Image (spheres, helix red, strand yellow):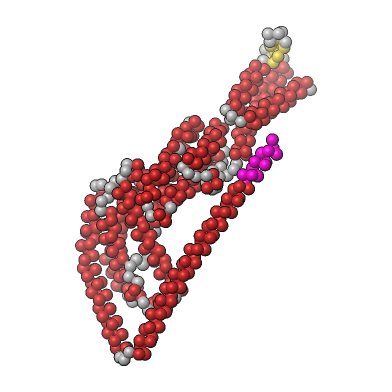
Amino acid sequence: ALKLEYQRKKVAVDAQLREGLREQLENVQRSLAVLTEGQRQVSKTRDELQGIDKLCAESQETVEDFSQIDKLARVQRNFEAVVMMKKGLENFDADLARAEALLRDDDDDLENQPNLLKAHILISQLRDFQDEALDQIRRANDSSSETTLLDYFQGLDSIVEWFDDHVGTACMNLIPLLQSDNNGMVVRLAIVIAKEEKNDEHVRALQEAQRDHEELANRFKSMNIGPKTVRGYKEKFLQAIEFYAQNQFDASKEDFLGDPDSLEKSLKWFFNDLFTVQQGMQQLMPKKWKIYATYTKTYHRMMHDFLISLVEDPELPPDNLLSILHWTPKYYKKMSKLGWKPTDLTPNVLDDREPELVRQWQSVILNAVDEWMDRIFAADKKALLERSPDALETNADGFFRTKMLGDMWRMLNEQIGAASASDRADVIEGIIDSMFRALKARQTAWQT
């Protein structure tokens, strides 16, 4: 039995290692492809900037009075920038009030948020203007003006926080929105997140280019109008998926610890969510997000953490441990219906620890048998040594027996019944063998 168990475990580990190696190889290949593409884009940008720089240098040599023309062009650009900055500052309070009005209207209809896109466009423009203004001041090393601008833009912070609360509410309710057929809200949210993701990619690429070619990039600062900081909406979106699932896992854990038989029922939401994403969300989100695979990977990892935290809890009752062991095959069967093979779901939901956990559950019964046998033997021995008048009694055949012998057989019968709940012949066989050893030890103890 041990050899067969070892072979089963070895096959499972080998399969997991092969799958892990394949997945890691694919990840490395994808990463190399992304890096190669990134290097290509950076090189392309560098070459274009160098080409522009070269054209400028050549123009200086070939065009008469170039220095004067260049000076006038700079004056014109600076004048336009001043006009734009002045206009932006003059309209800032009015635009801020418009954004506030849009968000206040959406407060009354958070399930639909009809003004989400308008608010996002307006607030993005305000944030871009703020970034540009502060960037200009910081390059001028004017700390007093920077402090003045920060005070002036202070009202935008609360508006951005308000908008983020609206986006966070939508992210935390994606599944309910889909289940209520509110596809319009889901699409609006996806547009906002996708736009912010694109902006973040642009900012990161620009920051990398500036680090690698700082001198050349600084000569074309006027080209860098737009977001200056990574805002991380895509990362917050992914975090919201985890927060939503974690709240449900917490509720499931409470139900399960209260009733070991409720595990399957308490985790029904898990498969319903994935089915909802599979059927309703994929066509509403950008394809490159691979939203169904993203949800599945996140949910599976959280299921793994949920179950491992339970089985590693020393206070977990044996009945709950047995329920987890019974439920694990059902988990993979349900995931198969959703289109996922066991090899697609890594790590194994119980880290391939089923044999170890079976032995752990089995040891609970064996320890109970040993404790009961020791207690019964001690009580019977004490009664005989003290010559208690009721230490012995006779059975139906007239043979003497200890008074607690009936309790011992009843206890053994109850433990066999408990072992039968495992539905595993090897477990029942092991427990009965242990009981025979305990009875033999009891017989030997009385004979000596």
Relative to 351, does residue 80 appear above or below in the rendering? below
Q: Residue at x 25, y 51 (%)?
A: 114
Residues shaded magenta: 1-13
Q: Residue at x 68, y 38 (%)?
A: 4
Relative to 263, does residue 418 appear above or below in the rendering? above
User: Where in the figure is residue 176, as x and y percent of width and height?
Assistant: 35, 43
Q: Nearer the viewer, residue 279 or 380?
A: 279
Rendered-image quadrant of the C terminus: top right
Main SS, magenta region, reads helix
In the figure, is residue 185 to the left or right of 46? left
Is residue 255 located in the magenta-colored stretch of the structure?
no
Rendered-image quadrant of the N terminus: top right
Q: Residue at x 62, y 21 (%)?
A: 413
Q: Nearer the viewer, residue 114 or 85?
A: 114
User: Where in the figure is residue 297, as x and y percent of width and height?
Assistant: 48, 49
Relative to 393, does residue 265 appear above or below in the rendering? below
Relative to 378, does residue 401 appear above or below in the rendering? above
Residue most extreme to the bottom: 64
Q: Residue at x 22, y 70 (%)?
A: 87
How many dots with numbers?
0
User: Where in the figure is residue 72, as x and y percent of width and height?
Assistant: 27, 84
User: Where in the figure is residue 316, as x and y percent of width and height?
Assistant: 54, 36
Q: Nearer the viewer, residue 180 or 355?
A: 180
Q: Quadrant of residue 408?
A: top right
In the figure, is residue 337 to the left or right of 154? right
In the figure, is residue 407 to the left or right of 56? right
Is residue 168 visible in this depiction of the protein?
Answer: no
